[in-house]
Amino acid sequence: MLPDLRTAKGTARMHVQSLNHRVPTECTFTHAFIETNPGFDGWGAAVAADFDSDGRDEYVTGGKGGGFYYLYDYEPAAGSWRRHVLTHGISPNVGAAALDLDADGKLELVCGEWGSRLLYLTPPARGLDNWSVVPVFAGLSDPHDVVAGDINGDGRAEVVVRNKHGALLVFEPPPNPLQRWTGREVHPMCVGDGTTLARVGNSEHTSIVANCGWFENVRGNGSEWVRHPLIPPSLHRHPESRIVVADIDGDGHNEVIISESEIDRARVGIFHYRNSDTPWEYEEVVPADRDLCALHSLQVVDLDNDGEAEIFTAEMEAGKTDGVRARPRWWCLKRAGAEWHRKAILDMNLGAHTAIAGYYTDPDTIGIVGKVWRANTVNGNGGANHVDALVAHSEAGRMHR
């Protein structure tokens, strides 16, 4: 079963060549620059969601280098993108989530900041500019991963925060989310990054899935967590990763898909559940010898409208590729029988960090928006930062309702 990108209001989307052949299907996109020299660096906190309730997604991202958080909205009448400034008062970290904690029908944002704070951002009464920022917790240490979902079954989102090379915590926001939040530690140390929420294994409740294992929500209310193995130690996987969960093989059970996000010779693999006591069975999608670099974007989505799941991933800039020997590309990874094939859907020497598929330009046509973490000196935009959009051609990427 494919994940539906039209997620419920108040939640955030989380989220080759056998490999010697080109993918034998159409997966064709048109590229456009959204911005070509927006300044700043350390771009993170990316979320795609419908913040203005117009039936189309917007893309938010922010980061360091002076502090910023932007929202990009496609305006069909003008045929162009508009940048809205949420704030210049913070420097968001890598992770962020959209959610509706105050039940007013409008999405808010929660993100970590470089340093120790967890931040809750609320939109203005009108428009998309100038959001209010409320620090709701301090005492974190590099809050890298931030994901949201209903963990305790009460219909309201909880927030999972993972410090990079540190503790994994769950926050249950108070009835008034502007008040101070309190967190409960799930695990004291998870090396690296890569975290999501999903039902996996033999559990009927929402679990936390991370590169350091999956954490079973034993009672279904977030009060007790049991860690189970996920990745076989013999694989020697790099701990910095991107993780998504989906039933990618259509067998009725969710698999865990993981990419190595910060290294060259990066691998993509699928992990299949067998039992709760042993690591999951590994299926390799992209082996190390393909020498793809820093696959910091990862999503399962039907990019070519054939009813089957593809894996989208993309290579970074930020020195992970150099733009000369290694030119970053955006990839569609597709299963054909027992083999995986790949196709470059963007090959313009433009890397991406946390690119996300969504319905940006039309409620029925899939697109992908991404940005850099930090630009390569040599890239397809003259060595400058950039924000990019890919929009599907024709029937490719149209999703079934």
Image (cartoon, helix red, strand yellow):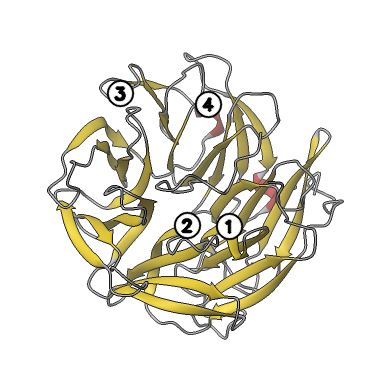
Answer whether labels 1 and 3 touch (C-beta < 8 Å): no
Answer whether labels 1 and 4 touch (C-beta < 8 Å): no
Task: Point out the image quarter for the N terminus.
Answer: top right
Mark 1 to mark 4: distance in Å?
32 Å
Which residue lies under the disc numbered 4? 232
Q: Is residue 348 visible?
A: no
Answer whether labels 2 and 3 touch (C-beta < 8 Å): no
Give amino acid for label 4. Pro
Out of 52 and 137, give the one closest to the viewer: 52
* Residue occupying the point 49% across, 72% down: 73
Q: Residues within 10 Å of mark 4 (few under 14, many from 20)?
A: some
Mark 2 to mark 4: distance in Å?
34 Å
Answer whether labels 1 and 2 touch (C-beta < 8 Å): yes
* Residue 99 at x, y percent in the picture: 36, 49
Horizontal side of 5 relative to 11 (left or right) equals right
Which residue lies under the disc numbered 1? 358
Answer whether labels 2 and 4 touch (C-beta < 8 Å): no
* Residue 126 at x, y percent in the picture: 33, 71
Mark carried by residue 221: 3
* SS for dot 1: strand
* Residue occupying the point 12% across, 47% down: 180
Which residue lies under the disc numbered 2? 49
Give amino acid for label 3. Asn
Answer whether labels 3 and 4 touch (C-beta < 8 Å): no
Q: Residues within 10 Å of mark 3 (few under 14, many from 20)?
A: some
Give amino acid for label 2. Ala
Q: Earlier in the sequence, mark 2 or mark 3?
A: 2
* Residue 176 at x, y percent in the picture: 17, 46
Mark carried by residue 64: none
* SS for dot 2: strand
Front: mark 1 or 4:
1
Front: mark 2 or 4:
2
